[in-house]
Amino acid sequence: MYVVHIASELAPIAKAGGLGDVLYGLSKELSRLGHQVEILLPKYDCIDYSLLKELQVYYRELWSYEGPYRYNNTIWSAKVDGLSVLLLEPHHPKFFFSRGHIYGSHDDIDRFLYFSRACMEFLFKSGKKPDQIHVHDWPTSIIPALIKDMYQALGFPPTSTVLTLHNIEHQGHCSPTNLSQIGLRGEDYLAPHLFQDPVQHHLINLLKGGIEYATAVTTVSPSYEKEIKTRQEGKGLHTTLIKHQQKLHGILNGIDEDFWNPETDPYIIQPFSTHPPFTEEAMLAIKKGKEKNKKELRQRLNLKADKRPLIACISRLVPQKGPTLIAAAFRHIVKAGGQCVILGSTYSPDMQALFVHLQEEHSSHPHGALFLEYNEPLSHLIYAAADALLIPSLFEPCGLTQMIALRYGTLPIVRRTGGLSDTVSDHNGFVFEQPKVDEMIPVLDQALSLWKKSPALWQEKQKEGMSQDFSWKHAAKVYLALYESLKP
């Protein structure tokens, strides 16, 4: 099977969220199973080029279009941890991907529409014949329409398309003229069965159009697939998703267990194995490993070395993640006999102000620490050191942090939603129903009490969590079965 992914992110070289992790993990497992996988990505100036191997020009003189103008592009090839990556570099006067970031420009719509059209020009002109083209979220959701309405008429071979919805909150609203800029008659797509937004009828909705045109649509967990077909969670697309529910599939993401492995993790102080069997000796080694990492973390963060449970939160501090709940939990935990560490970053001035205030309020606190930054090495140490991980999301398509926590013997405390529902229960963690402080606090108290008073029951939850397989092995096989079923 020859699979081409076209996306805006890829961990670890260009990552803004879970999409990058998913694409990396799925591609790596498909490659391990012997399938040919190529990933098309913009050649951002902010890529971590130190992680690229064998970077070289792959295809020159790739001409693509924006309105009446023709622009040259270069395709570069590279290896990322053995994966074949193709980077598209536009020679465009607006320097689309030389902005120092992945998202956040005023012309993001134009940037990714141009990228999508140029990717199809490349696949067509280079003579590639993938069995499957897999696109991700709104930035590349125009591609199924480009294939069907433009490139098949030019002779591009019949190819099925899969669109994965990583988070339908972001949908790519734009004007019909944006589609006209890449060679489609934009006004023709302003129809309810095509790209017309279901709420703002004068606008194009790129994600909606992708759902209409793709051969199959996947979500990143079974529960999220059910939730987005409701008015409350569908973000305006629930009727479209119900209409196409026969081609909608909820497939639970995995994690890269080579990268997230406490036995080999280079960022932690004391390695420990969390794979079965869980003999008394093995559980003692896990306990000692976590204690040594906790000691190191406390020293680094100037936290007091008391016999207290350590509850952490590692999260983007955005509305989806429940930041006001995170702040309330921090205050409660440090008062109720626990320690709390928050590691998170945000682009929102309001969120930044909220957590800077919390940070100043607890400066030099012996039982609380906040770090408002992205810090990969510190996150690994926190996973290994913490007793529990708080994830109070308002909605969560899948979530990876709870799976990572369970792999490190750390119990998740979660709000029951999306992928959190599919991975965490009262057997391997702690769950509350509604995203409300008065529902979260009793569950926090339950976790603090269990750690202090019932270490044997705490250990049983750990065993249950560590017994689960959250690798990409299962999900990759489900995707392969889907790809096979879609072959033209």
Image: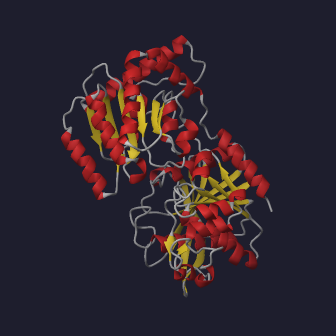
Q: Nearer the viewer, residue 403 or 274?
A: 403
Left or right: where 251 falls relative to 130:
left
> Up-down: is 178 above or below 441?
below
Left or right: where 71 falls relative to 290:
right
Residue 440, image x, y percentages: 39, 37
Q: Nearer the viewer, residue 187 or 73?
A: 187
> Up-down: is 40 above or below 94?
above
Residue sitting at x 36%, y 38%: 438
Is residue 106 among what the camera can see? yes
Q: Nearer the viewer, residue 146 or 237?
A: 237
Is residue 273 among what the camera can see? no
Residue 339, image x, y percentages: 30, 29
> Up-down: is 89 above or below 188?
above
Spot the residue most to the bottom: 68
Residue sitting at x 43%, y 21%: 289
Residue 422, image x, y percentages: 58, 39
Q: Quadrant of the C terminus?
A: bottom right
Q: Nearer the viewer, residue 281 or 217?
A: 217
> Up-down: is 279 above or below 233?
above
Left or right: where 171 falls relative to 155:
left
